[in-house]
Image (spheres, rainbow, N blue to C red):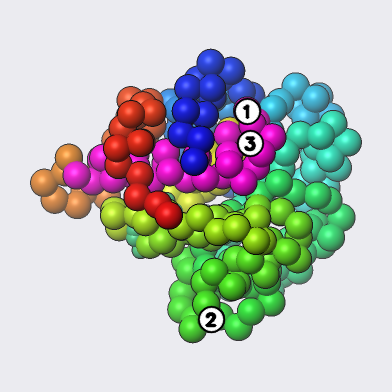
Amino acid sequence: MKIDLLDTLREKNPIAFNISNFVTVQDVANGINALGASPIMSEEKNEAEAMVKMCDSVTVNLGAFTESQLVQIDAVTTFANKYRKPIVIDPVAVGAVDYRKERCNELLDQIDVAVIRGNAGEIAALADVEWNAKGIDAGEGSADLETIAKTLAKKRDCVVVESGKTDIITDGNAVVRIFNNSDLFKLHVGSGDMLSSTIGCFCGVDDDYFEAAQTATAVFDVAGEVVAKSMKQPLAGSFGVQLIDELHLIDVKTVEKNANFE
Ligand SMILES: Nc1ncnc2c1ncn2[C@@H]1O[C@H](COP(=O)(O)OP(=O)(O)OP(=O)(O)O)[C@@H](O)[C@H]1O
Ligand SMILES: Cc1ncsc1CCO
Ligand SMILES: [Mg+2]
């Protein structure tokens, strides 16, 4: 794993263009800003080309899109392919709402993406595997998590990050597992959105998206673990704030020492 990509990210300070959702946009912006990237958000289709030309990566979060925003998402992602900017997709709740799954699949049919990051319920839905997703949460299912992730990676010819207690990262062939010791992430709505955007930032500094996704996930997971360890009791509100603090403080040594992966 290329953990020192964290230093590269801080040297380059990549512009990370995010189409976010109104629930978590501020955590996403502050999280990746603290980490060392330069976030910019937009919902306006008329500036899509300028935004994409300027940025190093595009992260599209499908958490709360409207019909009119789909037009902007279309424009942004088409320009991103034209200007060769990596796209990260966060398919929020596609396992729970058919409308979302249909729109997301239409989008994936028409563009090339670098990474899809979702929980098991979301990745299973896009891989056409039986699963009981629960709203924005993973829900439950009995299918093999690695098989689901690999199926989607092959289907969409991209890297898949399937988050959960173990984060599974695959390019369709190789698999890296990152074990996460902090379940405080689940107390903070938008942990997943922040992870997806963090992956976007790293894809903006290394065009090996499999490596970029691994480093991003390891950095994010370790940041959460460091915060969790420092707390005497689980504090949901403080966790969100301190996670942003730790994304700023974290360094390569801390990730090397604490990342638990194989
Ligand atoms: N059971 C768990 N134990 C430990 N860590 C977890 C667990 N589930 C998820 N995580 C961690 O939480 C982070 C976000 O992943 P998660 O799967 O919760 O995304 P999500 O469902 O899209 O979240 P959200 O919808 O709140 O944005 C990841 O870093 C992941 O490692
Ligand atoms: C709670 C919620 N609803 C739509 S998006 C979102 C944030 C998690 O993605
Ligand atoms: Mg999510």
In this view, 157 is above or below 227: below
Give the residue number, with chain letter if any, for mark 1.
205
Mark-to-mark CA distance, 3 and 1: 5 Å
Is the C-beta separation of discs 1 and 2 under 8 Å?
A: no
Give the residue number, with chain letter if any, for mark 2.
143
**Taking 254 as reference, is 39 left or right?**
right
Q: Give the number of the disc on residue 44.
A: none
Could you tell me which secondary element the residue under label 3 belongs to?
Answer: helix
Q: Give the number of the disc on residue 203.
A: 3
**Taking 29 as reference, is 102 left or right?**
right
Q: How far across and how far down the image is residue 3, in percent?
A: 46, 34
Could you tell me which secondary element the residue under label 2 belongs to?
Answer: loop
Mark-to-mark CA distance, 3 and 2: 29 Å
Disc nearer the start of the sequence (3/2): 2
Q: How far across and how far down the image is residue 10, in percent?
A: 50, 20
Q: Amino acid at mark 1?
A: Val
Viewer-closest of 75 and 227: 227
Crowd band around label 2 with a 10 angstrom C-alpha radius: few (<14), some (14–19), many (20+) = few
Q: Is residue 145 visible?
A: yes
Crowd band around label 1 with a 10 angstrom C-alpha radius: few (<14), some (14–19), many (20+) = many
Q: Amino acid at mark 2?
A: Ala
Is the C-beta separation of discs 3 and 2 under 8 Å?
A: no
Q: Is residue 134 visible?
A: no
Q: Amino acid at mark 3?
A: Cys
Mark-to-mark CA distance, 1 and 2: 34 Å
Question: Where does the magenta region start and end?
Answer: 202-229
Q: Quadrant of residue 245?
A: top left
Q: Residue at x 29, y 55 (%)?
A: 181
Q: Residue at x 52, y 45 (%)?
A: 214
Ligand 1, by image quadrant, is: bottom left
Q: How far across and how far down the image is residue 83, in percent?
A: 85, 31
Q: Residue at x 83, y 51 (%)?
A: 111
